[in-house]
Image (cartoon, helix red, strand yellow):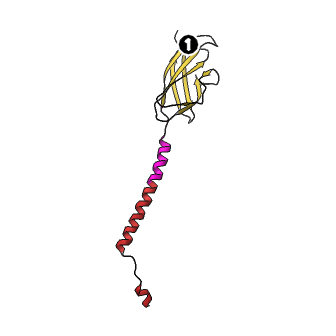
Amino acid sequence: MKILRSRKALSPVVASIILIAVTVAVSIAVAAWMGALTFNFMATEQGQVTNLTFTVGDATSGKIMVTFNNTGTNAITINELWVNNAKVTTGISPALGTSTLANSGTQYTVTIAVVAGSQYEVKLVSSKGNAFPRSGTAPT
């Protein structure tokens, strides 16, 4: 019995300070981890098709020049180009799949049959699946 009485324990004040310090350290680690996750999920693509320029011609010489501007801070990769709900796979310059840097006006030229006075809806689709639409009417 004498051995048990001679042991000294931590005072309640020291124990409380240690408990608070561990709680603060764990909460800081969790906050840093959640912050890193939030930044990865919040990196959204921001861009817009700013202009459509039409060149009226026949089935091989008509063109639509699509001006795309990346207004965000991350690069955007355009993988698909649609005209009037039809995916265009050929006659696109420059080639799709290259990154568009922030604040750069990239111009895509699509060679298709453009009919004078017709309405066209052009949609660029990014690698993340975001769509950037624009519609316009070919000149008469």
Observer-nearest of 42 and 96: 96
Residue 91 as seen in the image, left or right of residue 121: right
Q: Which residue is mark 1?
A: 55
Residue 35 falls within the magenta-colored stretch: yes
Observer-nearest of 82 and 117: 82
* Residue located at (39% from left, 71% from top): 15
Which of the image's four quarters has the N terminus? Answer: bottom left
Observer-nearest of 38 and 114: 38
- The majority secondary structure of the magenta stretch comes to helix
Q: Position of residue 124 (x, y in %)?
A: 55, 27
Q: Position of residue 48 (x, y in %)?
A: 48, 27
Q: Residue furthest left?
A: 13
Q: Position of residue 66 (x, y in %)?
A: 53, 21
Does residue 69 lie above or below 62 as drawn?
A: below
Helix, strand or loop at mark 1: strand
State which region is magenta. 31-46
